[in-house]
Amino acid sequence: MIDEDSEYFLDELEEVTNLAYDTGYADFPKLLERWFYLISDAPDSIASIMNEVISSTTIDSVMNDMLVEQIGIGNNTLNWPLDKVKRLGGQQILLRAFASTDIDYEKFVGSYFRSFKGDYNDASHEQVRKLFLPHARELDRYIRRRLEGGAIPGSDRFVPISHNQPIVQEIIAGLENITNQLAGVNDGDPDEKAMLSGELSAGRRLMQATHVRLRAIAEIVVKPLRWIAKKFVDAGIGEIASAMIALVLTYFNLR
């Protein structure tokens, strides 16, 4: 069930998204700035989801793996990951770079979109059709599915945990780190924090098993992390929790 505030936010974000149809290349970064300003004021439940998306990849990965440079004007290509969250994260990072002018938007559309024949508006409109609008639609669907609590495919099955993989050790260490930091957080009800610490400890023990049920990972590991990411969205512990969620979802392929 999507609450009223989240539904209002998503409707407002869609209205700003649709302005891109009639926005020229010179004004598109400004439109993105407005779009991301709206996202920065998202309800907590959506903000925590967005933090997970952004934490799924890095600017270095976008520049080195997702932007493919080739010889010739307009021949450069975009190589997005098959993984949905990493794809959304990479596109978010690229679009944010346009908005902040960290990447020259005019030069980019002239290099990556074949419509460019000297007219930057044509190239920008192609970018909107092929990148921004598909990204905005996929992001909206992903957020709605998460808010509605979509079931995890195959959640009753057991899967192995490979403890020689660095990502597993990173998850276990991250859960312990969050547990320790939670004790030093001044905000929040003491009983509530004690309950969360117990859940995180249980999650850490679960990650030390050789086989686990995916439903248990979702309930015992992911659920308390999501609560912490939402409750402490503006604090360091909230950012760490969001990063841990991204790692857990990636390792167990919970999309």
Image (tube, grey):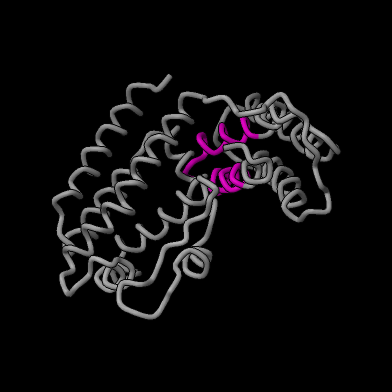
Q: Residue at x 47, y 68 (%)?
A: 63
Q: Residue at x 44, y 36 (%)?
A: 142
Q: Find the residue positioned furthest to the top.
A: 1
Q: Compare residues 239 and 156 and report the one nearer the observer.
A: 156
Q: x%, y% of residue 139? A: 40, 41
Location of the C terminus (image quadrant): top right
Q: Find the residue positioned furthest to the right.
A: 210
**Numbered circles on residues, count:** 0
Q: Compare residues 119 and 55 and report the one nearer the observer.
A: 119
Q: Is residue 229 above or below residue 169?
A: above
Q: x%, y% of residue 186? A: 58, 38
Horizontal side of residue 62 vs 247, given as left or right:
left
Location of the N terminus (image quadrant): top left
Give the residues drawn in magenta, as a range.
222-246
Q: Is residue 245 above or below residue 216?
A: below
Horizontal side of residue 15 vs 10, given as left or right:
left
Q: Is residue 130 above or below residue 149?
A: below
Q: Residue at x 31, y 70 (%)?
A: 108
Q: Compare residues 71 and 45 and report the one nearer the observer.
A: 71
Residue 142 is one of the magenta-drawn residues: no
Dominant SS in magenta = helix
Q: Residue at x 31, y 53 (%)?
A: 130
Q: Quadrant of residue 2 in the image?
A: top left
